[in-house]
Amino acid sequence: MTSDGPTQDGSRELAELATSYGLRPLGERDKLSTYTRELWRRRAFVWTLASSRAYSRNQNNYLGQLWSVLNPLLLAIVYYLVFGVLLSTTAGVDNFAGFLVIGIFIFTFIGSSLQAGANSVLSNTGLVRALKFPRAVLPLSVTLAELVTLLPALGVMVVIVLFTGEPLSWQWLTLIPAVLLTQIFTSGASFILARVVVSARDLRNLIPVAIRLLRYVSGVFYSIATYVDEGVLGAIMYYQPVAVYLNLVRSALLEQFDADLTLWIAGVAWAFVLLVVGYVVFWKAEERYGRD
Amino acid sequence: MTEENAAIDDLDDAEDGIDDTGPRPVAADERRPSLIADDVHVKYRVFGGKRRAHTEPGGRLRRAFNRSQRHVGAVTEVHAVKGVSFVAHHGESIGIVGRNGAGKSTLLRALAGLIPTASGKVYVDGTSSLLGVNAALMSSLTGERNIMIGGLALGLTPQQVRDRMDSVVEFAGIGDFVDLPMSAYSSGMSARLRFAISTAAVPDVLMIDEALATGDAEFRARSQKKIEEIRGQAGTVFLVSHSAATIQRMCDRTLWLDEGRLVMDGPSDEVISAYKAAVRKRSGRR
């Protein structure tokens, strides 16, 4: 009871004491510029966390890091058997094996990034409650870990595409900006998803459902241009971000596909708009992470 | 019930007495405050469980409904800290005692700025941090890798971590094991490594939550030295422990929490003996 009584007066007195000695109040969100500077200062932490996470994933078995190549390879074989041989969704695609491998690898990367990004704060509550750092580190590092995991898979992907008879050309270099844009997009989307999942954690259960839906509408194992008519629906399906990034990567490696300027603009726009909006949205709730 | 209230009233008197004799420092006191807690309240939500009502009234239908509420939409708000105010000074070591669930750990996390306060404010001079990088460490990675992760998590630069690597390994006393994954460590070794990493960066205000319970006697002595070192650098140390003896040995001031409220705040000897008396009284009654 005593603690409730005198606090009204004590409050002002203590606040004055704090200011007279230059003590800072805790739990106030930094300004966006300060926050960004602090995040930049922690870039080594983001990177170490990401690479360690990616590395520790394959550490506890005999083949170790070899699995980061074997896994995507086996996955590609399974999908080729199902969609190339059994179901045959190959219409309108010259090099279906190459088309499919790119679709599977890049979509798996996007899907697991979004999944990990959405859970990044909630599944690291322990870390949030133990240490002080800009929480934006978490979505950034888990999506970066997915990128690190993707790198060996990208190597496999390039080799498979070469085997399917695609000629090597300068065009292949656009693979780098295409993947980087995809990474920026998933980071931005993860900021938004992470905040949404923290404030309404039940939505966490809907994320896999949404990713499953994306997998089927984004032209992972069929060509959108062949199966969907022109018009509004076609444009939406073609210019939604996941389809854009799949097509950008395909245009880099496959001779049949070419990315026009509109596609690149769409790719850049999705990536940076989501990154900026997501970053601000995430920062707005900074002081609330770790409450539950 | 009345007995308990009486006991607490007695202690409240004791607290008032301390307040009167030792005037709250404003400007005349030469001791500089390092942390001020001002009417701190902490609430948090718990998912997946609900407290049962003591009696479940109504018919069978009502009971069935109440029961289903424990499984769907089961969210409980826990008011863990209810209005705690105190002023901590540079060079002080402060123990926090109380029963299980008294809000000690929650208060500590709020003081470190890791759990937002529901109302009230915490003011800190410099940086405050909770001792414990456990959450950042990954058991499948080597000790060396974990020292890097932990150090970066504490806000050091990669270069600073590399500079301190040897002293951390030496302080933890793990020797060659630093190149093996932490999952291969004995529990004592990993506890020592965790503590060593945690103290690689020295904050102005350090919070320790039962961290010293593990480790052998030699290590306990070394940790005590580390705490003295932090106090020597004009830092403030908070220590939460179930062991009243530990607190009496390491802290010169003690806060006693009960059900989220500050029961008593004063020199360790006085508070600990009052706390022990209350515990005896409570267990004696049972």
Image (tube, coloured by chain):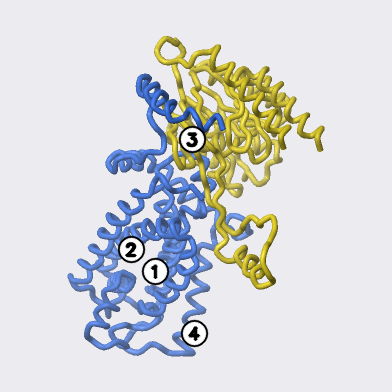
Q: Are marks 4 and 3 on the same chain?
A: no
Element marked by disc 2:
helix
Give whichever of A204, A216 is nearer the camera.
Answer: A204
Q: Disc 4 versus disc 2: distance between alpha carbons?
A: 26 Å
Q: Earlier in the sequence, mark 4 or mark 2?
A: 4
Give the residue at mark 2: A182
Q: Residues within 10 Å of mark 2 (few under 14, many from 20)?
A: many
Q: Earlier in the sequence, mark 2 or mark 1?
A: 1
From the rendered image, report the letter of the chain displayed in yellow. B
From the rendered image, report the letter of the chain displayed in blue. A
Q: Which chain is mark 3 on?
A: B
Q: Earlier in the sequence, mark 1 or mark 4?
A: 4
Q: Disc 4 versus disc 3: distance between alpha carbons?
A: 60 Å
Q: Are marks 2 and 1 on the same chain?
A: yes
Q: Are marks 3 and 1 on the same chain?
A: no
Task: Give the numbered dot on residue A106.
Answer: 1
Q: Amino acid at mark 1?
A: Ile
**Between tags 4 and 2, which lies in front?**
2
Q: Is residue A126 left or right of residue A251?
A: right
Q: Is residue B64 above or below residue A86?
A: above
Q: Which chain is mark 2 on?
A: A
Q: What residue do we see at 63% from left, 58% from top?
A: A61
Task: Give the numbered dot on residue A82.
Answer: 4
The x, y position of residue B248, in whole percent, is 68, 21
Q: Disc 1 versus disc 4: distance between alpha carbons?
A: 18 Å
Give whichever of B215, A134 is nearer the camera.
Answer: A134
Q: What residue do we see at 49% from left, 90% from top?
A: A86
Task: Give the numbered dot on residue A68.
Answer: none
Q: Is residue A207 above or below residue B144?
A: below
Q: Which chain is mark 4 on?
A: A
Q: Are the residues flagged by discs 2 and 1 in contact, CB closer than 8 Å? A: yes
